[in-house]
Image (tube, rainbow, N blue to C red):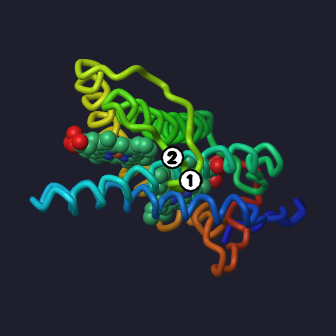
């Protein structure tokens, strides 16, 4: 282990519970939103397909609500990276992937919402609260928005695969506490390896 005798131990902290909770719920909700659409493709009964699309919309809107909560959580509890200095390249990669994730997680529900309005349907949050109409009814607009929504879903899957790989890389190869800090029941790792204050 790379102990530095003269530098004091650096406090390693877990993410706030709100950040952890909203992260895992929205990760799970994203998988459910995609699975619902894939399941719908396999079915032919119109009523069941309509129900599944309704569920898809509500899960997608939940992701939008969580997006707002996460942003507030990030402002209230700024991220702590104490004990693990990153090289400028790694810092840029982490910031870039988080911006990409946040952008796509905002764009997807808004595109779905606008598609629904362009199809001539109102959007109700949790099937209760009417949301404002984003676009007029317009079949051409439906096609365009659906294309964006579809390509956005591929982009989301691509970014999540990279994000997942990065989390595993941190845990298995860099052996830092980035993943543990996002998992409620795992004890955060010590920071001995990073106690030299040398960026890795
Ligand atoms: C992160 C959230 C979301 C994800 C990942 C997602 C993903 C998808 C995917 C993969 C499709 C199939 C695209 C295709 O192959 O054409 C789709 C279709 C659709 N989604 Fe979403 N969606 C999300 C949020 C929403 C929301 C919030 C709404 C509406 C309020 C919505 C409404 C729709 C509609 C209307 C379709 C077209 C279904 C059809 O008629 O074929 N989506 N979505
Ligand atoms: C099993 C899969 C996943 C793992 C292991 C994982 C792990 C992590 C970890 C360790 C962090 C903290 C990174 C850091 O401090 O720099 C993080 C942040 C983040 N993850 Fe994931 N994640 C997963 C799935 C997802 C999915 C599916 C999404 C999007 C739908 C997502 C969106 C985000 C976002 C937006 C952040 C930044 C959080 C913030 O600081 O507010 N993650 N993830």
Q: Residues within 10 Å of mark 1 (few under 14, many from 20)?
A: few
Viewer-closest of 163 and 124:
124
Q: Secondary structure at mark 2?
A: strand
Is 138 rendered above or below residue 33?
Answer: above
Q: Residue at x 28, y 26 (%)?
A: 142
Is 186 rendered above or below residue 104?
Answer: below
Respond yes or no on whether mark 1 lies under 8 Å from ligand 1.
no
Q: Residue at x 40, y 31 (%)?
A: 117
Q: Quadrant of ligand 2?
A: bottom right
| Image location of residue 22, percent across then percent down | 62, 59
Viewer-closest of 172 and 18:
18
Residue 189, label in figure: none
- Whether residue 52 is visible, yes or no, is yes
Look at mark 2 in the image and give the residue it sits on.
124
Question: Quadrant of residue 179 in the image?
Answer: bottom right
Report the side of 96 relative to 185 (left or right).
left
Report the side of 55 relative to 143 (left or right).
right
| Image location of residue 4, percent across then percent down | 80, 63
Q: Secondary structure at mark 1?
A: loop
Look at mark 1 in the image and give the residue it sits on.
128
| Image location of residue 19, percent across then percent down | 69, 58
Q: Residue at x 54, y 49 (%)?
A: 125
Q: Give the position of the N terminus as an image quadrant.
A: bottom right
- Whether residue 169 is visible, yes or no, is no
Viewer-closest of 194 and 133:
133
Respond yes or no on whether mark 2 lies under 8 Å from ligand 1.
no
In the rendered structure, are the residues bearing label 1 and label 2 in contact, judged by CB atoms less than 8 Å apart?
Answer: yes
Report the side of 146 relative to 122 (left or right).
left
Question: Quadrant of residue 16 in the image?
Answer: bottom right
| Image location of residue 182, percent across then percent down | 62, 65
The alpha-carbon separation of the residues under discs 1 and 2 comes to: 5 Å
Q: Residues within 10 Å of mark 2 (few under 14, many from 20)?
A: some
């Amino acid at each position: 282990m790379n102990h530095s005798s003269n530098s004091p131990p650096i406090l390693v902290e877990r993410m706030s519970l709100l950040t952890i909770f909203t992260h895992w719920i929205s990760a799970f909700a994203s998988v459910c939103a995609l699975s619902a659409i894939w399941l719908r493709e396999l079915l032919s009964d119109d009523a069941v397909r309509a129900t599944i699309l309704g569920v898809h919309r509500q899960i997608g809107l939940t992701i939008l609500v969580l997006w707002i909560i996460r942003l507030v959580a990030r402002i209230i509890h700024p991220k702590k990276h104490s004990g693990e200095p990153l090289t400028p390249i790694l810092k840029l990669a982490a910031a870039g992937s988080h911006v990409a994730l946040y952008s796509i997680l905002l764009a997807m529900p808004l595109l779905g919402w606008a598609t629904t309005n362009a199809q001539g349907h109102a959007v109700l949050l949790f099937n209760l609260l009417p949301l404002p109409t984003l676009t007029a009814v317009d079949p051409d607009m439906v096609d365009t928005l659906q294309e964006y929504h579809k390509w956005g879903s591929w982009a989301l899957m691509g970014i999540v695969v990279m994000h997942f790989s990065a989390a595993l890389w941190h845990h298995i190869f860099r052996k830092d506490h980035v993943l543990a800090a996002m998992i409620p029941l795992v004890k955060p790792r010590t920071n001995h390896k990073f106690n030299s204050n040398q960026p890795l």
